[in-house]
Each structure stands twice: as C-alpha cells, then as structure tokens.
C-alpha cells in the first residue's frame, strides 16, 4: 500500500492501481484498500469504476473519511454538486475540519451548489421559457411561442 501511495504522489496512477491491487492480495479487502483503488481509478478518470469501489468501501466502513471525500470528488466531477456537498460535510465533520483538502472541497461544493440556484437575471435563450415573478411567492412560466 505504501508503494501505491508514493506512486500516486508521483502521478503514476496506473502503476499505483497495480500496487494497490497487489496490496489487496496481501492484506485482503478492507475500506482502506478499496478507497485507495477507488482513488487511483478517480485519478485515471474512470469515474464509474471509482464510484462503485468507493461505495463498496463505505459499505465496509461508513465513516472512512478518505473514501467519503473521494466519493464526493467523483460526484463533483459528474456534476452532482448537491450530493457531493453532503459527503464533504460529513467528511469535514468526521475529520474535525483538520484536513485542508476536505475543507477546500466543501467550499467548492457549496459555491457550485449556490451557482446552480435559479438566477432571475440569467440570459434567456431565444424560443425558451422564462420564469417571471408576479408577486411574493408566485411565479409564472412564460414561453416565446
């Protein structure tokens, strides 16, 4: 596992994945091993595989912070900022806010989820729909048709 961690730091993600798989053969499957394999898949851009493996790691240990954080990163990459935000909040709480990367991921997810909220001043595409506020709490959906 140590060799895999060093290879990840060096940017050798494919070799790290192979080292993690060898480590799994030696130590067995646990949340740490699955989290490492999921991280390598994430670094290689294999988001679907990373998501499945990280979810499996969390089945074994629901409070394993690295797996929670990395699954949040996978979800952010897939455009699921709301789901990622929940995971980052959990990781941040379990970690007591000590890890800078988790804090940064949480701040990014919060900013991204706020950016997805309806913006009344956003540009409308021609022929599209508009949501117009009529009075407090009442909106009307208008079309250019």
Image (cartoon, rainbow, N blue to C red):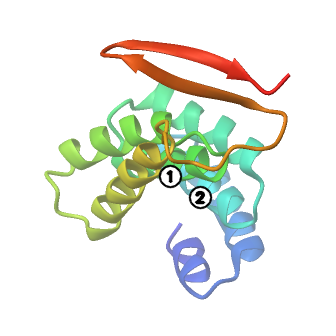
Q: Is 6 on the left or on the right of 61, as rendered?
A: right
Number of disc labels: 2
Q: Eyeballing the image, is 94 above or below 135?
A: below
Query: Where 144 falls versus 35 (above or below)?
Result: above
- Looking at the image, residue 44 lies above or below residue 140: below
Per the image, label 1 sits on a secondary structure element best described as helix
Q: Residue at x 45, y 23 (%)?
A: 133
Locate residue 93, reporting x and y percent: 19, 43
Q: Which residue is mark 2?
A: 39
Q: Work out which quarter of the rendered image holds the C terminus and state it.
A: top right
Mark sitting on residue 29: none
Where, by quadrant of the figure, is residue 46 drawn? bottom right
Q: Which mark is residue 70?
A: 1
Find the distance from the CA under tag 1 to the CA under tag 2.
Answer: 7 Å
Left or right of 44? Residue 4 is left
Q: Is mark 1 in CB contact (under 8 Å) with mark 2?
A: yes
């Amino acid at each position: 596992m140590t060799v895999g961690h060093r290879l990840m730091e060096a940017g050798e993600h494919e070799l790290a994945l192979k080292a993690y798989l060898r480590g799994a053969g030696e130590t067995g499957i646990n949340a740490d091993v699955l989290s490492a394999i999921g991280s390598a898949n994430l670094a290689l851009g294999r988001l679907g595989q990373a998501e499945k493996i990280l979810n499996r790691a969390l089945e074994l240990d629901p409070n394993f912070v690295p797996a929670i954080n990395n699954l949040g990163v996978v979800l952010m990459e897939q455009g699921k900022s709301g789901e990622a935000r929940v995971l980052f909040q959990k990781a941040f709480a379990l970690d007591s806010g000590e890890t800078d990367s988790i804090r940064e991921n949480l701040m990014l997810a919060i900013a991204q989820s706020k950016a997805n909220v309806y913006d009344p001043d956003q540009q409308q595409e021609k022929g599209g729909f508009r949501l117009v506020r009529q009075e407090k709490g009442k909106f009307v959906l208008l079309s250019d048709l």
